[in-house]
Amino acid sequence: MHHTLISYMDETLLKNISKQGSETDIRYYNRKSGNDVFTFLLPIKFPERIVPLALAASVADAAIIDVGKIDRDLGEVLVALESFNIERGIFIGEEDNLKKIRMFVKNTPMENYSYSGRNIDSILDFLNGLGERNADGEGYVVVDQSFSVKGVGTVALGFVKSGNIVKHQEIRIFPGQKSTEIRSIQMQDVDVEMAPVGARVGLALRGVEPEDVERGSILASHERFMTSSSIRIKVKRSLAVKEELYPGAKVQLYTNMGKYPANVSDISSNIILLDLEQEIAITEDYYVIGQQEKMPRIYGGGKVFR
């Protein structure tokens, strides 16, 4: 099984259960146990910037959250988990704070999280209990980094969000029109023929440059997704947000490792119409709205209203 976890915790503890990998504004850690692989995303530029927190949450299917300090920063972490509907996770910390968190997360996606002290065995038990992910659906990859490697060409790092991907698969780079072929696939620095849902992968791509595969790009079959610069989202406003958005408001849209400036064009009940500066792929994933110069810096999220 392969899982991606947003991690808000002491890095020393994380180092006891995993090995550090690459780094951007998110630090990546990896743990391999038999056939099970876990990727931990630590948003190291948060709380100074909300973006790494939102982008890490946008690809996570589970969470490890330390509640040692109940403050505004932890509050924003909880809003991100709520807005991206991350329903599996574990809260770690002292018993008094764990009791408080139980009250805070009632009636949110986090209400069924596990609770533990900072105990490595308990964390490993939680990880092992995550189980296999649903592999249904056509495979696609969300890109978080791309670069050129001498003798190899353009390499994209990312996460398989659905289904499986295979070597030599022909794919389109969304939201653009460019096509490419997956020349090779690596997982944990090992060449493989196929990568399953949840896997963190390195893909060698044929005939494209790194700038063609920017962070937030989606690699999928040619007709997999529609694209649009106007999007309606059925938004659930976070319980921590007191003021509603209004037409004309400038916001940020976060989804699948992408950050997009947008304007609120219309609001009808909880359906918000956003106009973006560029086209994006329309997927079945969660879209989260960030608000500027307000706390919390995440307003809420939901899926595309069709």
Image (cartoon, helix red, strand yellow):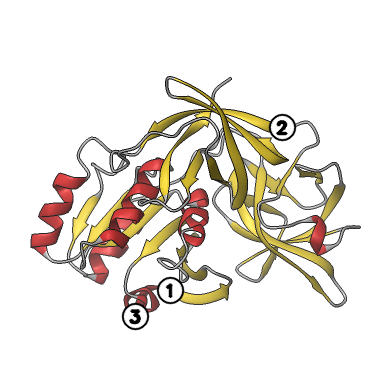
Query: Is 40 in front, or is 274?
Result: 274
Dot 3: what SS? helix
Task: Answer whether residue 227 is visible to the viewer in this image.
Answer: yes
* Vertical side of 272 occupied by 209: above or below: below
Residue, disc 3: 12
Q: Looking at the picture, does residue 41 appear above or below residue 180? A: below
Dot 1 or dot 2: first in sequence order is: 1
Q: Which three-letter amino acid code belongs to the residue tagged 3?
A: Thr
What secondary structure is found at the residue carrying circle 1?
Answer: loop
Q: Residue 211: image x %, image y %?
A: 80, 61
Q: Earlier in the sequence, mark 1 or mark 3?
A: 3
In front: label 1 or label 3: 3
**Mark 2 or mark 3, which is nearer the start of the sequence?**
3
**167 sits to left or right of 85:** right
Quadrant position of the C terminus in the picture: top right
Residue 173 on image: x %, y %: 78, 46
The answer to the question of whether label 1 and label 2 lie on touching residues, with beta carbons closer than 8 A, is: no
Q: Which mark is residue 18?
A: 1
Q: Tell me whether the residue at label 1 lies in contact with that at label 3, contact meaning CB atoms closer than 8 angstroms.
A: no
**Nearer-the-camera pick, 139 or 62:** 62
Could you tell me how far apart the alpha carbons at marks 1 and 2 are, in whole angstroms?
39 Å
Q: Which residue is mark 2?
A: 228
Dot 1 amino acid type: Ser
How many neighbours does mark 1 have within 10 angstroms: few (below 14), some (14-19), or many (20 or more)?
Answer: some
- Which residue: 19% across, 65% down? 93
Q: Residue at x 52, y 55 (%)?
A: 55
Q: Looking at the picture, tell me which residue is in the foreground, 264 or 214.
A: 264
Task: Give me the residue at 42% from left, 58% from top.
Answer: 6
Task: Give percent across and percent down for residue 208.
Answer: 87, 58
Q: Is residue 128 visible?
A: no
Q: Amino acid at mark 2?
A: Ser
